[in-house]
């Protein structure tokens, strides 16, 4: 323990600022809000982070946090090849073949692209544990490879380990395409050797506890959250158009934008919506094959493709929106989790157009928030289409709500309780 009496803890995460992906925010929030009078936080991350989004270089490291890095190969070529010509309307088929080849290649890496970093992270963490007398480790996925050094350290040292699962890995994941036997073994070993497991929704906790009875009594829900100060900003009067904003990825079509865009196109063609009054902002990548069906259609003219943005830039887009757009695929691995960006959306207190399975974690959570308008994932029936049209034609109103329960600071208090009980 350091001379000042603070407890040294080690957080292991593949993503951390300046990486601006949503996956970086949970680790950053915990590092930022852990009581600085009680904890000295050490964060272990890659020397290079392969990410689709620009870095947020403006983000400062909190005073009580020390960043350590372990070597990571430069994987930028992988991302560049995957993104190249993502909006080239003349070559959607070629890009589809290229994407399929890259997906096949990524599926051969076990457990993911961070595997080499995980090995170097283990050796770096060993040095930190010996030098700093660290007794508590927290690791988070994605990427699931971040759990490997923590697992190896837990077996070798007298440390306590909190293992944070934010996505379904092998269990309850019909989209999994990697090495099944290895993935199952990794998942089992994490749950067997970790002193405590955290999940992001009650449904996720229940599903994993049912599959692994060893988790009973040593698992907790810590929701994803937001670090955005609650905003209730009315849009400037006299604006000539309404803006719908989508942030993030479409997961190669797993989150399918086509049903909503097709409806918008129908309404624009029929005159039910005025073409000059609408703009749809996509703050992230949209693959060429996803827009192929609407090429040349009226809705295409109101799409504003921003491409990958930093978190600060994406947040600015949310602030200027009239409506925020959310999609949750109707697949097992997505139904029972809640996208982290939903909590950012909620902080802006604006209408959220949520296309989600009606039996889902998002649907359950949305009962607390009247500004979330739920629609079934996929094609809408006529009554639902009419309801959506009516919502869009009305003047969008900010709807005050209480999100303090879902702030990063609040979630960190739950983590501190786990630390104290280990």
Image (cartoon, grey):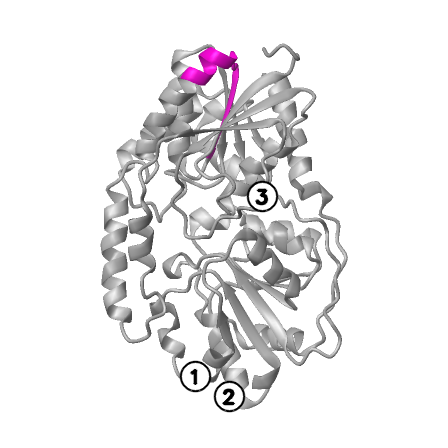
Residue annotated with mark 2: 269
Q: Is residue 273 visible?
A: no
Residue annotated with mark 3: 59
Q: Is residue 256 left or right of residue 196?
A: left
Q: Residues within 10 Å of mark 3 (few under 14, many from 20)?
A: few
Q: Nearer the viewer, residue 280 or 80?
A: 80
Q: Nearer the viewer, residue 266 or 304?
A: 304
Q: Nearer the viewer, mark 2 or mark 3?
A: 3
Q: Are marks 1 and 2 in contact (CB under 8 Å)?
A: yes
Q: Nearer the viewer, residue 28 or 261?
A: 28
Residue annotated with mark 1: 297
Q: Quadrant of the N terminus?
A: top right
Considering only order in the chain, which callout, 1 or 3, is on the residue closer to the N terminus? 3
Above-or-below relation of 212 to 258: above
Q: Secondary structure at mark 2?
A: helix
Where residue 20 appears, x then y in whole percent? 51, 47
Which residue is pictured at 64% across the width and 53% down the height?
366
Considering only order in the chain, which callout, 3 or 2, is on the residue closer to the N terminus? 3
Q: Nearer the viewer, residue 8 or 168?
A: 8
Where residue 42 appears, x then y in whole percent? 53, 25
Above-or-below relation of 212 to 106: above
Which residue is pictured at 48% across the width and 81% down the height?
301
Where residue 321 appears, x then y in whole percent? 63, 66
Could you tell me how far apart the alpha carbons at marks 1 and 2 are, in whole angstroms? Answer: 9 Å
Considering only order in the chain, which callout, 2 or 1, is on the residue closer to the N terminus? 2
Q: Which residues are magenta?
A: 127-140
Could you tell me how far apart the alpha carbons at marks 2 and 3 are, in whole angstroms? Answer: 44 Å
- Quadrant of the rendered image containing residue 69: top left
Where residue 284 appears, x then y in whole percent? 47, 60
């Amino acid at each position: 323990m350091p001379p000042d009496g603070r407890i040294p803890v080690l957080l292991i995460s593949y993503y951390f600022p300046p990486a601006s992906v949503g996956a970086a925010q949970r680790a950053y929030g915990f590092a930022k809000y852990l009581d600085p009078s009680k904890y000295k936080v050490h964060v272990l991350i890659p020397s290079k982070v392969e990410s689709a989004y620009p870095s947020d270089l403006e983000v400062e490291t909190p005073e009580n946090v020390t960043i350590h890095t372990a070597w990571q190969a430069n994987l930028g070529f992988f991302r560049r090849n995957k993104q190249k010509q993502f909006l080239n309307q003349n070559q959607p088929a070629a890009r589809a073949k290229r994407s399929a080849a890259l997906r096949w290649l990524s599926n051969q890496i076990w457990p993911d692209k961070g595997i080499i970093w995980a090995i170097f992270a283990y050796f770096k963490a060993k040095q930190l544990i010996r030098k700093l007398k660290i007794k508590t480790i927290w690791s988070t996925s994605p990427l699931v490879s971040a759990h490997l050094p923590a697992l190896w350290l837990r077996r070798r040292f007298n440390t306590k380990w909190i293992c944070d699962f934010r996505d379904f890995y092998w269990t309850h994941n019909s989209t999994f395409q990697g090495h099944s036997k290895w993935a199952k073994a990794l998942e089992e070993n994490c749950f067997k050797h970790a002193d405590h497991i955290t999940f992001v929704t009650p449904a996720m906790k229940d599903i994993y506890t049912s599959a692994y009875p060893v988790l009973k009594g040593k698992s907790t829900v810590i929701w994803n959250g937001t670090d955005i100060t609650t905003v209730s900003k009315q849009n400037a009067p006299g604006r000539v158009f309404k803006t719908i904003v989508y942030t993030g990825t479409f997961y190669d079509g797993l989150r399918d934008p086509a049903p909503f865009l097709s409806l918008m196109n129908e309404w624009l063609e029929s005159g039910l919506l005025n073409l000059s009054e609408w703009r749809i902002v996509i703050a992230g990548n949209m693959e060429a094959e996803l827009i192929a069906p609407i090429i040349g259609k009226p809705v295409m003219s109101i799409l504003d493709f921003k491409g990958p943005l930093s978190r600060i830039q994406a947040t600015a887009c949310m602030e200027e929106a009239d409506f925020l757009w959310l999609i949750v695929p109707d697949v097992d691995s997505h139904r029972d989790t809640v996208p982290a960006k939903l909590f950012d959306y909620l902080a802006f207190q604006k209408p959220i157009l949520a296309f989600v399975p009606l039996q889902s974690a998002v649907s359950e959570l949305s009962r607390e928030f009247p500004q979330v308008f739920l629609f079934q994932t996929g094609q809408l029936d006529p009554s639902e289409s009419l309801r959506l049209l009516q919502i869009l034609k009305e003047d969008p109103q900010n709807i005050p709500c209480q999100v303090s329960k879902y702030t990063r600071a609040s979630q960190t208090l739950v983590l501190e309780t786990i630390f104290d009980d280990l």
